[in-house]
Image: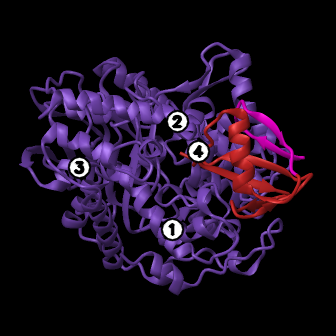
Amino acid sequence: MVSINFKLTDIGRIEVPLEKRKTLATVLQQCAAQAGIELGGIIAIRAGRVLKESDLVEDLDEIDIFPAISGG
Amino acid sequence: MFSILRINTATCETKTEVFDSTDFLLGGRTLSSRLVSREVPASCDPFGRKNKLFFCNGVLSGTIVSSSDRLSIGGKSPLTGGIKESNAGGIVGVRMAQHGLRCIALEDAPKNDAVWKIVVIGKEQTEFVDGEFLAGKGVYEKSELLSQRFGVKAGCVTIGPTAEKLLYATGLACSDPHGVCSRYAGRGGLGAVMASKKIIALVILNDGEVKPEFKDPDAFKVGTKRIVQLLKENPVSSLFTKYGTAAMVDICQALKVLPTQNFRHGVMEGAEKINAQSMYDTIKERGGEGQTQHACMHPCAIQCSNVYSDKDGKLLCSPVEYETMALMGSNLCLKDLDAIATLNRIANDAGVDTLDVGAAIGVAMEAGLAEFGDTEAAIALMKEVKDVTPLGRILASGCKVAAKVLGVRHAPHVLGQAIPAYEPRGTKGMAMTYLSTPMGADHTFGFTLRDEEEPTSKEGKVALSKKFQVIGSRMDAMGMCNFVRYSVRNDMMPLLDLVRFRYGVDINGEEFDNIVKETLRIEHQFNTDAGITALDYRFSETFYEEAQPETGEVMDITDEESAQARKW
């Protein structure tokens, strides 16, 4: 199970079952489908490091997803 | 045809000229930077007779298009010594449009012993009114007095007591829709430039009668609705509506680029106490005058602004934005939203840029004038600024001057302008942008953070920064709010279609980007002519020598690399 925590949104935490390693992009698509949402631009962070969409995600990972916005 | 009202501040003469060129059509930074480039000698004294101050509205100003009334103000900056464009929301742009004005130029300067004047622009005439009664007062009091005299719906631009003393980190305060001069074109010291012309306020009366005309009114209405629809559909802009820019606190903390302890760190323990959720919850719990969403201009479908209330529900400060929360919060190790809002309010009243003075207070704390995290001491320093004491004058001159006077090497600035709220060693894309803007360190100039796959690496960041320098400059180029870019993303046509429906002028996306790039070239050329060299586009040496503890990164961008990012 991978825990995807959507920060600063009403989506909250989504847990995605994962039998084998998958790219972040694939897992996020799965999340979006599960929650019925459009993701838009995001910043993904695992253990303090930024994840690329091509990075592999594995079982028990905890990933924070932030909306990609900018300051004023 | 588009009008420019030229106001000679020495002779009190005025004249109106009309133009139909593309730069006057687009307005905004496209126009202000070209006028500065053409009419201000790059080597002039920013406080001398040869500097000018240009106030430009944008191509869709005065219409019902969301967020289209940004006011772009240009001149030579006393803070950086180079070209400056600083922009603000509020109602001044629309008041100009109602008088048929694309630009107001303040020119020349009277002798030192001249008295303060207010320039009042009405449908019958432009006149100079005695402004001595405003001298020495804070911006909030000035704002109230201006409203009493000229009406709450007049579009006013005024300065604080710090600008009256020609201090470098002073801004121009512009009327919001409630008649309060709280929308700041804060960066670059343009408040002091207006003061050098002995103009204490510029007022555009609410008696303009010019209505916008359209080549194709029906298509314009449809196109306007399309922009609102795009904004509402975009998850990012809808998020702004709830949290505003404060959402960046958590993001920067997670990325380890939240400026902390005078830019010594990128993470602050307890940052959640000042994050967007805390702010949202506090405003909601307190009720009263507080608002979690608020428009700085009408109409605006984003409403990213806020009204922060005190414990009794009374307005404390509006707006409180992320950059201020970082520079006057985490950068000073303050974990108290009330304290940040109080600092922000005093800064607004003093007429200073919250970023430059926040950074200067950080420098003062590093110099030992106060302890990091000491809320009362931070507020006391800010009051020194408001009272224009000798120490206050140093702080109101920005962090570069403060660091020199106070003996601090780690001065967070580029070209004399404080680094905004993204610690550069942890985000090399933002660092590249800071090093390549002609304005001094400026986050809006090319916001790379959301698209950096490896923020700590400088690889590919020249190209990334340049890409976002164009994207970031598009909205400025036509006087739109920067956040409208979330509606159009990479396709400018929904906005350029509106230009066509209004004026019958076709500009395609490529042509528009070429105008944007030409603006960048012009701005850099001005700086070169002003004597700014490649050696000036650097961080303080400590950023290259000392690693940021949380990322282990030092600044490793070379002069050659930043020069590439400035080449257009």
Q: Please give the chain letter of the residue carrying mark 4.
A: A
Residue farthest front in this picture: A19
Q: Nearer the viewer, residue B189 or B507?
A: B507
Residue B105 at what x, y percent from top left? 21, 49
The span from disc 1 to disc 4 (Cα, nearest Å) is 21 Å
Residue B452 at what x, y percent from top left? 63, 64
Task: Tell me which residue sits at (26%, 38%) in the image.
Answer: B60
- Hey, what amino acid is under mark 4? Gly
Name the quadrant containing residue A13: top right
Is residue A4 covered in magenta? yes
Question: Left or right: B468 with respect to B261?
Answer: left
Judging by colour alone, the chain drawn in red in this rendered image is A
The span from disc 1 to disc 2 (Cα, nearest Å) is 35 Å
Judging by colour alone, the chain drawn in purple in this rendered image is B
Residue farthest top in this picture: B288
Residue B9 at what x, y percent from top left? 20, 48
- Hey, what amino acid is under mark 2? Asp
Q: Is residue B317 above or below residue B274?
A: above
Report if the CB atoms under discs 1 and 4 are less than 8 Å apart. Answer: no
Question: Left or right: A18 with respect to B20?
Answer: right
The span from disc 2 to disc 4 (Cα, nearest Å) is 38 Å
The span from disc 2 to disc 3 (Cα, nearest Å) is 33 Å
Q: Earlier in the sequence, mark 1 or mark 2?
A: 2
Q: Which residue is mark 1?
A: B465
Q: Please give the chain letter of the residue carrying mark 1.
A: B
